Amino acid sequence: RLHDNEVGQFFCRCLQIKTILVLTQLLAWAHTNNDYVNHVYCFDPRQITDKTYKCDFVKCDKYRLKFLIETIENLNISLVSHGSGLLTYRDTPENVFKQLIQQYKDKFEISIGFHQEVTQEETDVEKAIRQLARDNNVHVKEFWTTTLYHPDDLPYNNPKAFPDVFTQFRVALEKQSVRVRSLTHIPDKFKPSPDDDNIITSIPSLADYGYSNVTVHSSSVFPFTGGESSGLAHLHSYIWEKNLAKSYKQTRNSLTGCENSTKFSPWLANGSLSPRKIFVELKKYENEQSAVDAGYWIIFELLWRDFFKFTSLKYGTRLFYGRGLRSNPYDWKHDLQQFEAWR
């Protein structure tokens, strides 16, 4: 996304560098005080064509992949409208950035910026990028942009002190009057790629991954397309045009209909929507419509989302252990016949 992008804010004001290679993880980066900028997105095969550790599920099946491709297409359009563009690769970030560093290191001072994640597959990539940067004397700057509250603002000294119970987390924020940080604004015009940049890439299609005729069912409760533009349009429609925030608590658990719950999750998950943007719009709606606490329960759910992010930060891979966070033994069933019947 381009809205509420803290990374671009930091680079344009703090780093006086020549070239920035940007690992976006579905996020746009904006800069103003640098000579050149490359925006990069990797369709990592480990996250798309590889299968799950158990049960042999494809990690990114056709509908999720469709949403992802639409997201990246929209991101590229947005970057082009700001005088920039997006480089896309069907390869791992480690391989891509190794090639880009080799191409630019004798010409420019290079920095790589990326958004931090908390679970192992993503943090393994981050570790590899850091090592690659150290080996090539490249500066790395990391940013936290995925949650409503920033971890540095929480009333805890370190992640290990984070509570295991959601209510304790919520009450602590309320008692300490922790504030949601303001939205970050981007410049109107982005810096170009290097003058001698002859790199030409293309965004893959569903056909490139062996899919064809991927259409959304007419009865789908999620008839939306991927991308920041569609996410912002849906946010505006849900809050301002249809006034659905006020009835969210009463309808949120319904399994049918595309308006009973917010449907913000897919855009939040891949970074197309900022949780802070949702928060700001809800507060603006409450003020302008004199609708006190109309957005409370949606913000409440965003807080639950934060809770699990910070729990992941605290426990790491233990979050996915079969015996749970407390390491209690469980007698899991492994009846493949029943599983296939469910599947």
Image (spheres, rainbow, N blue to C red):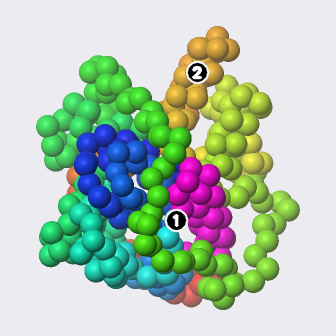
Q: Which residue is mark 2?
A: 284
**Residue 104, horizontal then vertical, whole percent:** 31, 74
Of badges 1 and 2, the one in the foreground is: 1
Q: Quick one: SS at disc 2?
A: helix
Residue under circle 1?
86
Neighbour tally class for label 1: few under 14, some 14-19, many 20 plus, Cα within 10 Å: many
* Observer able to see residue 319: no
The answer to which of 7 and 138 lies nearer the viewer is 138
The quarter holding residue 333 reads bottom left
Which residue is painted at 62% across and 85% down in the image?
209
Specify the quadrant of the image occupied by residue 100.
bottom left
User: Is 113 on the left or on the right of 159, as rendered?
Assistant: right
Tag 1's secondary structure? loop
Percent coordinates x, y for residue 58 in the rendering = 54, 81
Q: Is residue 13 left or right of residue 241?
A: left
Q: Report x, y in % for residue 162.
A: 22, 42
Identify the magenta region.
59-85
Quick one: 108 or 230, which is closer to the camera? 108
Q: Earlier in the sequence, mark 1 or mark 2?
A: 1
State how far apart marks 1 and 2 are (Cα): 33 Å
- Relative to the observer, which residue lies in front, 196 or 124? 196
Vertical order, 178 against 340 (above or below): above
Asked if residue 310 is positioned above or below residue 343 in the image, the reply reads: above
Residue at screen point 79% across, 71% down: 215
* Magenta residues, dominant SS class: helix
Q: Residues within 10 Å of mark 2 (few under 14, many from 20)?
A: some
Q: Which one is nearer the viewer's eye here, 141 or 300?
A: 141
Say what amino acid the circle numbered 2 marks. Lys
Which amino acid type is shown beneath numbered disc 1? Leu
64 within the magenta span: yes
